[in-house]
Amino acid sequence: MSHNIHTVAVIGAGVIGRSFTALFLAQGFKVLVFVSEPTPVSMKKLDDYLHDIWPTIEKQESASIKNYEILSRVNDLDTRLKECDFIQENGPEKLDIKTALFAQLDTHASPTAIIASATSGIPSSKFITGCKYHPERILIAHPFNPPHVIPLVEIVPHPKTAPDVTERTKELFSSLGRYPIVVQQEVPGFVANRLQCALVIEAFSLVRRGVVTPEELGGDIPLAPYSTYKSLLVVDATITRGLGLRWALTGPFMTAILGGGGNPGGFERIINHLGPGLWAWTTDMQAHSIMSEDHTSAFQSMIPVIQDSLGMVDTVALEKERDELLGEIIRLKKEKKTLMSSNGEEVKLTITFDSEALFAWGTHIDGAASLLRHRGRENLKTPFACNMFLFIRRNAIQSHLEISKPIDPIFDGFTEVLSLYESLEDRLLSKAMHIPALQALANSLIAQPSWAVDIGVVSELIDAAKTLDSELADWARCIPETLSYTTVIRMSSSAPSEVSSSKFVPRQIHRYPDFYAARVWNLYRVYRLIIQSIMLRNSPPTQSILGHHTTDGTRN
């Protein structure tokens, strides 16, 4: 277990609390779920939820869906909370309730435990006023619904939060496969909700003004009696069928850069092109903003319309489909080299598109090696640094395999630091990085006259190749069942025994369920075939055939 965290407390079992419980359980933590008062209904509701989503979550081998207890916040908090190393609060969005609750948590938690709040927008400095013991271990860890699917987590320390608490929290969520960002200043709503708020406020304003009309949907959705509701659906469609599709991949800044023609100068061009219009649009938006009204009445006219219309929508099925598609989108994003992965595991940036690409990569890799050698491994202590190191190492290995050139030793090691951030492919590559050195040695032996070949060196080469071949086989045996070889090629139980026992030589047409599995397994087979080739070419009988030379150095 990473970061000395073994037991996690989840305060509250609502929508966010249940999802957090699933996320922590999937990573092998023991979870204590504190609710106002456990009842058979609340216990069954949590159990049903966990069993419903458990098959869809990526899990550690040690994970157990039963490794949790549901406890009373009234009767058990003072005796059981001290068992927890990390506490995730998910209570109501009311300042007075949070102030009282955090005073309790601070009183009964272990002095070394971190206490995080999932509040959507209340800075923690507002509700730690009653914390008398260790307010420096309190901060915000704001997820996005549902936390077990959406990677983003906003880490927001208050001015007196200890720096190591912020860093440990960030590292914890990185190890959970999340993408934590640290918000440097306390502002209401933090970052994502402020962006979301600006969009939602303008969306309501457009509907109120009649700018968006139901007719825009045509016959797409048969909700004729509910014109206001249909207008809201039109606004949703501008996101789900337009802006949201791009923003899910590139975000607002990169979308603007690409809209301006891309690098270099894309952002400047789009600003020069749209600048005058932006000011005019903003002026009109401010003049018609519903925020000029009383906040309690601004949305009142929409509430009954939406509530009546919801009877025509299966929100349970909608939510399930949404979460399934979100998971699929996140998985697909990880496969694209030029997109930043939303869980931070694969930060990949395109360096150049011109004919000097190989030279650019070589310079980049050599420069990175020099920088690492100068600064040392102690600088690989943040998720960004580790992810960038893995990115550079990945490209170094792949390029050096093509030219049989040994990789700089600086890229070897760091296992204890990188283990939290390595993907399945990275773990494979960490073993394959030794192949180029074997290739180079094998080629040099083949090029030598037979009388000059040192048999001891040949034996060492073959032994090293056998060891590496065994390590690759061990990698294949230790991967999750969902990506195992027999699973990803969808072999049937009636497959011939010689096909079922195939290890790395393809003997049937492969029907991989996704490109990631295809790439990883193809790399695995290629690496093992290279090693087999090295052993074959450099075994003594074969070498005497392939590399026999005369005494003057020429081949027979």
Image (cartoon, rainbow, N blue to C red):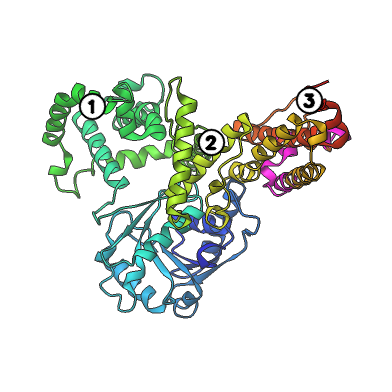
Label 2 – label 3 distance at C-alpha: 41 Å
Between discs 2 and 3, the one toward the N terminus: 2
Q: Label 3 amino acid?
A: Asp
Mark 1 or 2, closer to the camera: 2
Report if residue 71 lies within the magenta region: no
Relative to residue 373, is residue 131 drawn left or right?
Answer: left
Q: Which residue is mark 2?
A: 395
Label 1 – label 3 distance at C-alpha: 66 Å
Q: Which mark is residue 552?
A: 3
Image quadrant assignment for residue 506: top right
Callout 2 crowding tier (Cα within 10 Å): few <14, some 14–19, many ≥20: some
Q: Which residue is mark 1?
A: 268
Point 44% across, 37% down: residue: 340
Q: Secondary structure at mark 2?
A: helix
Point 43% across, 46% down: residue: 371
Between discs 1 and 3, the one toward the N terminus: 1
Q: Which residues are magenta?
A: 471-500
| Residue 59 makes an appearance in the image | yes
